[in-house]
Image (cartoon, grey):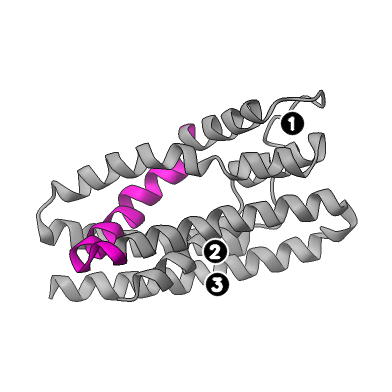
Amino acid sequence: MDFVVIGLGLGLGAGLAPGPLLALVMTATLARGFGAGARVAASPLVTDAFIITVSVLVVHSLPDTAASGLGVLGGLYTMWLGVESLRERTVDVEGVEAPDASPAGGAADLRRGALVNLLSPHPWLFWIAVGGPVLVAAWGDSPAAAVGFLVGFFALLVGTKVAAAGLVAAGRTRLSPAGLRRAHLAAGGLLLLTGLVLAVQFSRALL
C-alpha cells in the first residue's frame, strides 16, 4: 500500500469536502481577509495531534482482525463522505456564525478554528475509523511510511483550505456556484476512489 498516495488522496478529498471548518475558513476570510482564513485553515495542525494520539491508542489496543475490520469500515465511511460531497450543492456558510468583522489577532483566529475542529465529530470519526487504522498499518510497514502518510495528508488538507481562503479573498465572483459544485464533485469522486482502495486493502488482511 502506497501510504503517501493514500495520504494525499485523503487530504485532498477532505480538504475540499464541505464541512464546518471549510465554512469557517470562508466566513473568516470574508470578514478579515486572507490571513484570517489561512489561520483558521491551519487549525488541524493544532488539534489533530491530540485527536490522532487518542485514535491510534484505540486502534492499537484492538486485535489485528478487529483493526482490519475497522479499516474496512473506515473505507466504507470514506466512500459515504464522497457520496455526501457529491450530493452537496454548496458550502453551508450560513450555518456557521460569522466572525466579528473587527480586527482580531492571529491567535484568536487559530483558536476559533481549533475549537470548531476539536468539537466537530468529523475529525474524530475520520481518525478513529479511517486515519487511525491507516496510520497504524503504515507504522507497521515503516516509520517513514507513517510520516509520509501524515505529511501528505496534512499538506493537502490544510493546503486546499488555504487555497479556498485565497479564492474567497480574491473576490466572490471567482467562487461561482458552478465552481463550488465542480470542487465538490472532484472531492466526492476522490473520496469514493480512496475509500474503495482502503476497503479493498484492509479486507485482504481479513482473508
For disc 2, the marked residue is 12
Q: Real-space Cα distance between discs 3 and 2?
A: 11 Å
Tag 2's secondary structure? helix
Q: Is residue 176 left or right of residue 127?
A: right
> Which badge, 3 or 2, comes first in the chain's sequence?
2
Query: What is the chief secondary structure element of the magenta stretch?
Result: helix
Whole-percent x and y of residue 79?
44, 65
| Residue at image point 38% right, 73% down | 196
The amino acid marked with disc number 2 is Leu
| Residue at image point 13% right, 46% down | 61
The amino acid marked with disc number 3 is Gly
Q: Real-space Cα distance between discs 3 and 1?
A: 30 Å
Which of the 4 quarters of the picture holds residue 50?
Answer: top left
> Which badge, 3 or 1, comes first in the chain's sequence?
1
The answer to whether residue 90 is visible is no
The amino acid marked with disc number 1 is Ala
> Which badge, 1 or 2, comes first in the chain's sequence?
2
For disc 1, the marked residue is 98
**In the rendered view of the protein, which quadrant contains the N terminus?**
bottom left
Whole-percent x and y of residue 72?
28, 64
For disc 3, the marked residue is 189
Give 49 or 205, whichever is nearer the viewer: 49
Q: Is residue 191 left or right of residue 149?
A: right
Tell me which segment is drawn in magenta.
119-145
Magenta stretch contains residue 170: no
Which of the 4 quarters of the picture holds residue 195?
Answer: bottom left
